[in-house]
Image (cartoon, grey):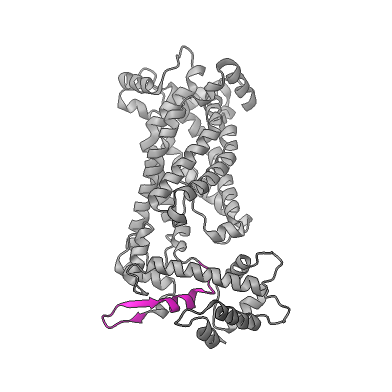
Amino acid sequence: MYQLIRKFVFTESHCLEEDNTKTFAELFEKLDANKDGKVDVSELKTGLAAMGFTMGKGEAQKMFVSGDTDKDEGLDFEEFSKYLKEHEKKLRLTFKSLDKNQDGRIDAKEIQQSFKDLGLNLTDRDAEKILHRYRLLKFWHIDADGTMTVDWNEWREHFLFNPADNLQEIIRYWKHSTVLDIGDSLTIPDEFTEEEKTTGIWWKQLVAGGMAGVVSRTGTAPLDRMKVFMQVHSSKSNKISLVDGFKQMIKEGGVASLWRGNGVNVIKIAPETAIKFMAYEQYKKLLAKDGGKIQSHERFMAGSLAGATAQTAIYPMEVMKTRLTLRKTGQYSGMFDCAKKILKKEGVKAFYKGYVPNILGIIPYAGIDLAVYETLKNAWLSRYAKDTANPGVLVLLGCGTISSTCGQLASYPLALVRTRMQAQASMEGSEPVSMSKLVKKIMQKEGFLGLYRGILPNFMKVIPAVSISYVVYEYMRSGLGISK
């Protein structure tokens, strides 16, 4: 049967439409073991295995879900042939994108260039190691000059009944923004593969990431409140140490006061994540040229715009979070009381105080976070990737922590200015000032280091936040049935 497929499906010449249909009909008849006019998952997996196609865990199910357009738990001939034709078109486009010199063959250099286009700089040796991981080497020809190549028919023969996107493995391993939550939400959103979108795994990952953020932010809330407290109240003339700051907060409101502002900080995770994800998908479609693969700079632009969109939508909650964090005992009874009093006393504009420095902070944070992470990722792949692109937990956490910390360091002055502008009306004797005047005032009175007040507790919460969010994320993945 395998030879039948090679003869009809993997012919050197392009078959006419009717010839393809006839060939697919013969193949469908062989797979339809019980002759009911439909092929189910079991028949598909068993039939293809008998033909020599060994499918990985979940691959038959993935192929079945993609083809079963009417969701009746069975592929009829029309669905079967339509899937194969559409999948073959995608394979042809993939092959052409890899075949840089358009000679009908792909060599190791072209594969290496394709990885580079994805932002992955690999040596010849490292590229061949990763290619071996993708099981392509059994198809390579050795030409007269010693070059290994694979042609279109061999490429199609291997991948026509293999729905996996092989180059996506590296991207999937190297995701980090969904997993790690250090209290800031300015990172570029994660990419989701077509498989994840089709099977619904994407929303489970967002839920897992959201719950990780809830637990992480709650666990590090005292340090976050200390950061805001020092950003607003600490100065050259009123130096506040960590110990003194915690003593003041506990004396004023008890131990529970260390978690002031955490409620709204946790609540805003869900709307912000949902808005950012939906906006990111739309911006990618707008920025991608001719519906093609989105490039790194386009991804950065789409992510930044999505972040700005989400921040614009939930920014009133950011203002309330700052006010509730800094509140004195009895000042507000809760989030709604806070919103009501701000609206009554200061008007709607108060909910967008500090908006400009907050939006401006997205660029340095997201840009440096992405650049540092890509640099660390490429360094690891170039030096240590042997039989797999999987770097392991410690490397992922380390890269994510370092890149996020660098992003925070670059955008921190803008975050401090934003926080002070948000808190102005709640500070006695404070007059509202513009962003530029506030920066000038800080520089004159406190110097450049005044823009980094509260940076110590901010950095102190990074490692526990990363650790907590990762552990919770993994537990949630397991609970939601997301496979490794």
Q: Please say whether residue 159 is one of the residues in the magenta stretch.
A: yes
- Residue 22: quarter of image: bottom right
Image point (69%, 82%), residue name = 33
Residue 194 placement, left or right of 451: right
Q: Please say whether residue 240 is one of the residues in the magenta stretch.
A: no
Note whether residue 334 is visible. no
Q: Which residues are magenta?
A: 141-164
- Residue 52: quarter of image: bottom right
Where residue 355 sits: x, y (%)?
47, 28
Image point (44%, 27%), residue name = 418
Which of these two is toward me, 358 or 408?
358
Where residue 281 sits: x, y (%)?
52, 49
Which of these two is toward me, 179 or 299?
299
Residue 235 placement, left or right of 64: left
Which of these two is toward me, 325 or 9?
9
Which of these two is toward me, 130 or 149?
149
